[in-house]
Image (tube, helix red, strand yellow):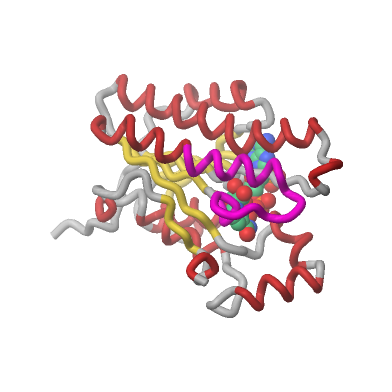
Amino acid sequence: MSDPFRIDGQRALVTGANTGIGQAAAIGLAERGAHVLAAGRSSCADTVALIEEAGGSAEAFAMDLADPATGAARLAEAGPLDILVNNAGIIRRADAQDFAEDDWDAVLDVNLKAVFLLCQGFARQALARGAGGRIVNIASLLSFQGGIRVPAYTASKHGVAGLTKALANEWAGKGINVNAVAPGYIATNNTTALREDPVRAGEILGRIPAGRWGDPADIAGAVAFLCTPASGYVTGAVLNVDGGWLAR
Ligand code: NAP
């Protein structure tokens, strides 16, 4: 009997796979049988080593998305892909009235424009060879909420949710499922500033029904599910993985 939660032999590219949620997602896909291209602007050697030590298959793949077009053009070197996980993202914090235009551009470029160009490049390749595929974009609670002192990040993540639905709608009939995972508050580099602020950290923890911050591995399971045959009829969804934050 085939296991609908396995993706043996499929080729998956994960952006920002050197650390945090991207590293966990890469490991999660490899655990389910995928060959992972661990893509990053920083070395992904640690991620590859973790996967190989566990008996999985992976390779490091250089991809800097600060210039989205140049970064997305790297897809042409990746070979055929079945799965794309758009995880790379940055956050810049400042009061909205002081928020710098350069910071706005940097955040929108990595978090939204690069996501679109990578989705487009992935789909062009898949459609050209008559294949389907799976795309998972990493959204955020700030795909739904306003956040504090992060206007560009919030705009970009609302954009990711909208883009996910727009592309799902266009490509559902062509065999490409496009979904997003919206992590809650996860202990990674992205949230160091929040966790080091005792007031904000206390406010956040006190509002999470699960009573704890999330771990990158909490997100990896949801990402993997959205890449397996088990989720074949799921597309255009934004799946909250937030310890109940948005249910509150
Ligand atoms: P993280 O540890 O800061 O990871 C961000 C990843 O994006 C890193 O691999 C980083 O590479 C990569 N990246 C940044 N700029 C890049 C560029 N120009 N080109 C290629 N890669 C680049 O934080 P994380 O929490 O794991 O974040 C992963 C995703 O989850 C992001 O999209 C983030 O917005 C989202 N998210 C996180 C949380 C949370 O609570 N942590 C909540 C909601 C959504 P470097 O290491 O080289 O900088």
Q: Does the magenta-highlighted stretch encompass residue 155?
A: yes
Residue 242, percent from left and from top: 52, 65
Q: Quadrant of the N terminus?
A: bottom left
Question: Where residue 6 sits in the image (x, y, percent)?
Answer: 29, 55
**Residue 215 counted in the magenta span:** no
Residue under the image location 23 percent in, 56 percent down: 4
Left or right: 138 as drawn, with respect to 239:
right
Residue 160 visible at all? yes
Rendered residue at 74%/35% (across/down): 104
Residue 217 at x, y percent in the picture = 51, 64
Q: Residue 68 in the image: state x and y as whole percent.
A: 61, 27
Observer-nearest of 78 and 198: 198
Q: Quadrant of residue 71?
A: top right
| Residue 148 vertical position relative to residue 118 in the rendered view, above or below | below
Identify the residue at image location x=43%, y=56%. 239
Can residue 47 be spotted in the picture? no
> Residue 64 appears in which quarter of the rendering?
top right
For the point 33% across and 40% down, the residue is: 177
- Relative to residue 226, is residue 162 depicted above or below? above
Q: Which residues are magenta?
A: 140-162
Asked if residue 121 is positioned above or below residue 224 in the image, the reply reads: above
Which residue occupies the extreme front position in the image? 97
Image quadrant where residue 80 sits: top left
